[in-house]
Each structure stands twice: as structure tokens, then as C-alpha cells.
Amino acid sequence: MKLGYAILTAGLLVGGALSTNALAGETLFSNYVFAVGPAGQNGALWAFSRDGSYSGLTLLNFNVSSKGAVVTEATAQAQVETDTLSAARYEIFDDDFAERRRIPAVYAGSKLGLLLPMFSLDENGRQSQPAGYYSVRDLRNIIENPLDEPVDEDTLQKQPMMYATSGFAYDSTAKRLWVARGALGVMVHDMSGKKNVDTTFVLNLKTNKLEVPKKNAELDLENNPEIFDVRLHPETGDLWLATAKGLWVKSSGGLKNVSKNLKDSRVTGLWMGGSPLQIIAETNYKKKDNVVGGLWRIYGEKNKDFVKVDFLDTAGKVQKKDIYDEADYTVGNVAFIGKTAYVLVHAIGGSISGYLKLDSLGARAWEKDDDGKLQWLYGYETGATDRKAVIMSMCAFPLSKNRTGLAIATYGNGVSVSADSGATWSVVLNRAKLSNNLGSIRMVPSVIVSPGEESLVSYKLDKESKVTIEVFSYDMRKVRTIVKDAVRNADASRSSNPKEDYWDGRDDHGKDCTMGVYYIRVKDNHGHIGWGKAMTLGGNFR
Amino acid sequence: MIRLKNLVVTTLAVCSLAGSAMAIGFTKKSELGGFDGFVERMGGGVRELGRGNTGTADTATMPGAFWNPALLGFRENIGYTLNVEKRDLDRLGGAFGIEGKVGKRMGVGFAVLYRGDRDFKIIDEDDQTVSTSKPFFSMFYLGFAYRATRQDAFGLSLSMSYDNLDIADSRYFEGIEVEESFRSPVTINLGWTRQWNAKWSSSVVIRNLSFSKNLSAKWTKNPSRDNTLNSTEGVRPKVLQIGLGYRSKIMGKPVYAWMEALDYQVADTLLAFDPQLHVWTGRVGFECEATPNATFRVGMDDLNWMLGAGYKFEIRVGKRRFPIELNYAFLYETSAGIWSPFSLGLRGYIP
């Protein structure tokens, strides 16, 4: 049995091996990418990043080589116009509620482009005040669309995220954009006439209608539940609303709650796509101090109502416990390719992230580890990223005429793109130019704030070499051997193996190194030596 | 007689090498390099550097407040030393000391040791160099000594570190109130020197004692004023340093042999008897006065090799003569394979 797992793991590692050779000299606005989304053309992808204070977008253009590898053709980037605004809100990792821990990124045709939420600074100087949405048509037209907040300033300051923009749906036939706005209900941006008109509706549970709220009306969440997400059914064109009190559908026949199983559930997200059509819903609520989440689905004609997604072991047996028993997850986004749904999830705080692969039966584990624990989440371990970084967003996008690509956004490690439904991935991220033959060594980042954080040893070889990487203290005592005689390939941009060639601020015995400057020596078997530097802010004496 | 000298020299060398070998063999629970206190481990004074960083058993060693506070008890004049070391990888170091006699039997001295990096590039996660910093680490010593007999002196020094990482202005930490400078609490070092006779001298130095629990020199550092970053703990290992000096002549030329054995207790305990919590290392050095004014040195500190030279001269101001010694050291840091040919020091006395 163990041999089987070993073979499977080896297969995943080989199959999921990152191909970075083709991607030299990429430039993202920042490697801290919060959202990715289609750009409307084959091979084009938007990536939204924030580097500490500034936010911006990168337009990436890919090609697929004859061997099936993804090649970056071009990149261009632009900063958002108002630098106090951003689509990435403060506390996006830590909020209790799932709908606030993701960034909806929806492509809404050439006229509106990619839609992203927009946040402004609050009184503490943090981007946590809902301010409308971005409409990214191209790099010169990153349009900021402020939205009216029909609530008083005090309420906005106290609980701003109650009114956050958390979902978009564009009706290209009626030329209407639907925007989910939490406690404010749903807004429709009507572009069918000469003048664009914005109207806000709340869901009235007494009348089962979408109604325009009265002026200065007080919030009544019992009768007007929050609306967290909106979708247009790809086949019927009906408007689906994910609300704090179930799933509602607006069709020609009126408005009705369509799911008995989710009738009173706090439905925080909704995704539709694939063939056969899958509709995936996320529920999330707070029970005392605990947050309870769930993943539900309708798969084609198989289910008449939403059922909880089954988690299967490697043999296909349904398990009683799933990932939600261990942590609270947020669905970042769902990408559909054919029969498979790729459900990106990340836990509160960003400690765990990865995507589930949902086939017709449910989420099947790809490995059972030595402790008997089933692994459902694809990510770093399966080669989707080459460094341990939180996966923030995921999308499917047209790579070429006949091929759908997958893209994931990571917090600190750029974007990964796959042309073969996640079997292999290519990483796109910012890399400084390096000299050949270990001529320049860069530690990325060069300051290790807490031991355990990884500083990548970045170097370049012009031919395959055996590399030894060691860390020395200021007084040139050897503190750590990172790799010894490890085979590394020549590469146009960087020869480092990010899975191994990093320093975590610890010595050979796993102890935190004290605050100071450390020197990293890289040697190859051809006589070349290069030095890099890293600073640790120290750890704790253990 | 020559046989005896050879025997002594061989014994010292073997002891030192054995110490180094033991250091390698027993460093199992921690690496000394990852521990606090590298400024102290690297020594201070180019004269001493040239002979393997040996100095605790030599009454002429300066700065005494750092090497062995008991040495201050042997001062007759005001002594001073100024040293600069430029090592590869942009490392710049130095030491300054001033010391003198107080009363008939006492001495006092002050020393500063400095180590810094003049070109540390702060690279962010986007692989962009956002700034260049010049972090430095320094130690201050204030030493007192009492000469109990003509042969014996006892000393005590109080030491404190001041480190500055020079990162607060970097864009890398934008939005965080970074604290970049850190001072340690005062620690205590004790020393004893005995000049047995014209040939032999010995020393015992105990470093880094504190009034805290376990007498450990331990402190907490918080790198951010708004507690955005995790705080960290620093512990400086307790050190037992035993030195031996031997003076003789070979072919009429004065020669000196120095040896030191050091034990670093790499644990926050009062006394640890587990050998794996100790790092043993050794230093050995030899000097030869080829001419009355010129001295050549060779030494080994742990696995690092040193060569040194010194030249003595006098400056006359009126009727007064000021003896000065100019020292040079060449260093090879063996583990890292780095040569450092730029170490210069000046020392002298004001009679």
C-alpha cells in the first residue's frame, strides 16, 4: 500500500513538476497577487497585486508551445489611479466570515472588463472601507466606480464590511450588471439606455420580491437578508442570489427560494459552470466562537437540490470527516473545466490553502500520508506552486482556441498557470536579473522576520552543476548546510530549486539563529563560488 | 633546553587543535555561529589577531577591559589601542581601548568593539532591492582590576551590547514601526591573571554572567514598537576561557607561545554537564621578535589561520617619548575560504 502511495507521490511530483525555463524576465506589479481573472482574449490573464502600500494590475499574455508548455509572451502592468484604493482589503486573511476573505474577480465582457471590489482607507488608515468596484478594461482604463452608501457614516465606520461588494454578475443580453452588496442588498447597474442608471434592491422576505428600500429606512436584516453573491444561470439566464437566508432565484416567474436544504442557510458564495453544469454553494456562519462552513453542490441532472460535497478517500470511499472538520475554509473561487470543478479554498489566517478537484462523485483525496491522513488539497505538495505561499485566487481562462487554462494567484509567489488542467504548472513572478556561474546571489527576501519564514537562495548556472549551499555567521562559522551536491539545471533566469534552496533562519539542529547578518555561500562543482546575505530578526531560544 | 621548548610548543599546538576537533565533534545541539556574541568571539586588537586571537594571559594585551579585566592591574602607564579590520563580504570591524593605573594596585579600562556590514541589500519578496543598510553590532566594556600580589591580579568588567540593524527607514517595513536598535542589559566578566615567573603566565576568564535566572545573559528584543513583529530572545553563552603563556628564546631571539582553551555553554542553564551543550574551541599563537622593533606572528583561532607583524617606534614630543606599535594581520577564515588582508592596528602608551 505504501509503495502505491510512494508511486502516486512520485508521479505527482514528476507530473506536477514546475517548468520555469520558458519564463524568463516576467514582471508582475508584485508577487503578492490577490486575484486572477480572464481578460477576454485567448491567452490573456489579469493579475491584481498589492505590494504593501500600492495596488496594481498586470496583463499577462501566454502562448502554448507545441509540447504543451505555457510560455509567457508579454506582460504589462499599471498601478491603480488612486493609491489609497485597493481591491485587497485589510484583514482579508483573518475575517470570521467567508464572504469577506475573498476577492470576487469576474470578467464582464469587453465593455466592463474585469470587475473587482474596491476599498478605501478607514479612519485608521487601513483599506477596509467598501468604496465601490473597479472595472478593468485595459491598463489605461482601470475605472474606479464609487458607489453610494445609503447608510449613515457612523454605521459605515463601525461595521463597514456589512456593506462590502462581494459578487458580480453581468447580463450581456439585458446589459445589466448585478452587484451583491451585503446588507444593502443587490445593486443593478443598467447600461441598456443612453444613461447608466444604478438602482439598489433589497430582498423582502414578506413579499418575496426585490424592492427598492425606502429612503432613510433602518436596516431590517430579518426581513431583508444580506446578499453575498449573485450569478446568472448560464442556461436559463435567471438571476441567483446567495443570501443570509438561503438561495433565491429571480426568473420570469418571480422570486423564490430554490433550495430546501439551504432554505435558512447563510449562503456566502455561489459558482456555476462546467459541463454538465455544476452549481456550487458555500455556507458559512458563526456559532458562538466557532465558524462553521460547508460546501454544497448540484451536479448536472444528478441532484434536484443542493447536497453536501462528498469527500472521498483514494479508493473512492466517502469519508465521514472532511477538511471542514479541521479548519474553517473560504472558497476563493471555483474554476470549471469540463466535468471537473477546481474549488480553491484557504483557511482563516492563510495557514492552509489549496484547491479541491471535484468530479461527479465529490472531492477525491490524492494521497493518504504515513499518518493515515487523507490529502484533498492540491497546491505546493502537488506542484501548483514552487514555494509555500497562500493561494488567494483561481480561475479558468481561454489559453488558446481549444484549450482552457487554469491560473492561481499566490500571496508572495506570483501566478501559476497550467495548460493541462493542473498536471503541470508554470510560475510567473518577478525575478531580478542574475549573472551566470553564481556571479550574483540574491536572498529573496533578504530579511527573515521570524524563523521559519523562507528566504530563497536565488542563483543562476549556465550548465548543469552540483550545488552546495551553506550558511555562515558573521564570524564565518558554518551554521547550516542547506543542500550538498544537489543537482541543479541551467536556466535562463534562475537555477534555484525553490523547494529546497531556501534558508529559514535556523541552524543545522533546527534552532533559531540569533538576530544578525548571515552569509550564504553557493558553490558548484566547477569551482564557482557566490555569496548572498540574509538578516534574521532572531527567534526564540529553545 | 631547546627540546623542552619544542615540547611545550608542540603540546600547545596539539591542545589547540584538539580543542578545535572537539568543537567539531561535540557541536550537536546547537551551532555556536547561530548564538549571540560573535562580536566577542571575534576578538579585538590586530596584535592579538595576528597570533590567533590569543591575549588573556599576556599582560601587554589591549584592550584589557575586553580580553581579561585582570590585565588592567598590570598597567603602569596610560595605554591606548585603535584597530580596524576590513574583512571580505563588506565586513568592517574595529576595536578601541584606553586604560591606565589607578592608585598603586588598581587599574581601570574602557573598550569598544565594533562589527558591521557596510553593504547589506534589503531585497523584498518581489526580488527588488528596496534599500541598502549598514547594520552594526558593538560591545562596550568597563573594566576594573586589583593587583593582589606582584604576580596576581583579579579583574571585573561590565559589558553591554548595542546593535543597530539600520532597517527602520527601509520601504520594506513600510507601515510597521520598526525598532532597529537594541541594548542588552549589563553583563559581568571576571578575570584572573598570574605571572608565575619570567617564562610562564596563566589566565582564567569567565564571561557573560548576569543577575538574571541561571546567571544567564539573556534578554528579549522587540523589533517593532507596535508589536507587529514577533519579539525575540537573545542569550549570550557563558564562557570559560583559560589561557597560558610561555616566553623563551630561540637562537637568541625572544619567542612567545600563547594558548587558550574556550568553553562555550550553549544553554540557558546555570551549569550544564551535558557535553552536547558545550562547544569547545582553542586558540594558539606564536610570536618572534626578529629585531627589537619588529615582531612576526602566526596563530590559529579555532580553524582560522592568522599571520601578523608588528613594528615598534617612538615619537618624541619635547623630552617625552611616546612608544607606539603598528600592527598588521592577515587572516584566513577556513570554513568559508575567505582571505582578509586588511587589518591594521595602532597601540601605545602615554608615559
Image (cartoon, rainbow, N blue to C red):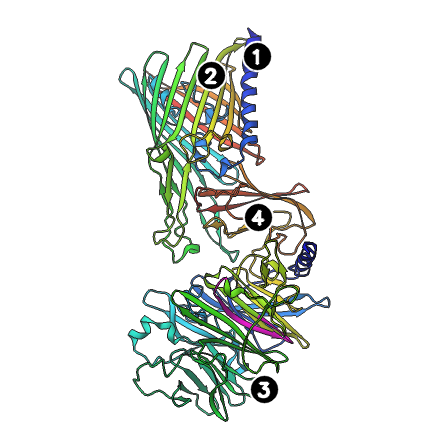
Q: Are marks 1 and 2 on the same chain?
A: yes
How dense is the environment of label 3, judged by Cα within 10 Å: few (below 14), some, or many (20 and up)? Answer: few
Magenta stretch containing residue A472, yes or no?
no
* Span colored in magenta: A326-342
Looking at the rendered structure, which numbered label has been put on residue B6? 1
How dense is the environment of label 4, judged by Cα within 10 Å: few (below 14), some, or many (20 and up)? Answer: many
Q: Which residue is mark 3?
A: A235
Of helix, strand and loop, which one carries label 1?
helix
Q: Nearer the viewer, mark 3 or mark 1?
A: 3
Looking at the rendered structure, which numbered label has been put on residue B245? 2
Q: Amino acid at mark 2?
A: Gly
Q: Nearer the viewer, mark 4 or mark 2?
A: 2
Verify CB contact (< 8 Å) between mark 3 and mark 1: no
Verify CB contact (< 8 Å) between mark 3 and mark 2: no
Q: Nearer the viewer, mark 3 or mark 4?
A: 3
Verify CB contact (< 8 Å) between mark 1 and mark 4: no
Q: Amino acid at mark 1?
A: Asn
Q: Which residue is mark 4?
A: A441
| Residue A193 pos. (x, y %) | 46, 92
- The quarter holding residue B241 reads top left
Tell me the quarter of the image containing the N terminus of chain B.
top right
- The quarter holding residue B80 reads top left
Real-space CA distance between mark 3 and mark 2, rounded to the nearest whole angstrom? 93 Å
> Which SS does the magenta portion mostly show?
strand
Q: Nearer the viewer, mark 1 or mark 4?
A: 1
Q: Is residue A489 left or right of residue A26?
A: right
Q: Earlier in the sequence, mark 3 or mark 4?
A: 3
